[in-house]
Image (cartoon, grey):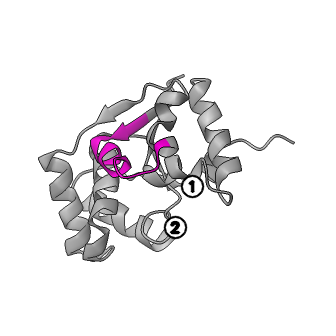
Amino acid sequence: MRKLKIYIDTSVIGGYYDKEFEIDTKALFVKFINKEYELIISDLTQRELIGAPENIKTLIQKLGLFPEVVSITAEAISLAEEYLKEKVVGETSKDDCLHIAIATTNKVDILVSWNFKHIVNIKRIHGYNAINILNGYPVIEIRSPKDIIDYEE
């Protein structure tokens, strides 16, 4: 069986050290370490990490992970602009739209985020996916780390 490709945004990396999110985030990273999922990040994620604290900036490397790094493309920019044009989110959420568009155009299985306002939000997810379908892309699963980890009985 093919491993699921999971794209994480910057909020998931930061969640590793956040009291509210650390348990579920660390459980997700264990899945990546155990190679249960294929970890995907983007050059946008790398750019957003530049100003982050050192422990967040170096987390993926420190955990010995080697994610596939996908790039911002003209295709992704165009799709992100469609999300904005259709007002799925406001102009201030351009990078959030880019994360969705990069994940969509790279055909990842699931985008994982802790951003409940602009990304992991049922109204927004429906909006992103409506635009994806209109533009010939598949729907994208958008979840929080909590939804990805298995809870053992």
Question: Residue extending furthest front?
Answer: 54
Residue visible at 31% across and 69% down? 93
- What x and y, as percent, mark residue 4? 50, 33
Query: Residue 137's x, y, as percent?
Result: 27, 50
Residue 78, relative to residue 31: is it above or below? below
Above/below status of 69 relative to 125: above
| Few, some or many residues within 10 Å of mark 2 (<14, 14–19, 20+) | few
Q: Which residue is mark 2?
A: 116
Left or right: 16 as drawn, with respect to 124 = right
Task: State left or right for residue 15 relative to residue 101.
Answer: right
Quadrant in which the C terminus is drawn? top right
| Position of residue 19 in the picture relative to residue 123 (left or right) | right
| Contact between labelled residues 1 and 2, with CB atoms less than 8 Å apart | yes
Helix, strand or loop at mark 1: loop
The amino acid type of the residue labelled 1 equals Ser
> Within the magenta stretch, is there residue 48?
yes
Q: Position of residue 47 (x, y in %)?
A: 29, 47
Q: Nearer the viewer, residue 104 or 8?
A: 8
The reply to whether residue 10 is in sight is yes
**Residue 136 coordinates in the image, percent (x, y):** 23, 52
Residue lying farthest to the right in this orientation: 153
Magenta stretch? Answer: 40-54
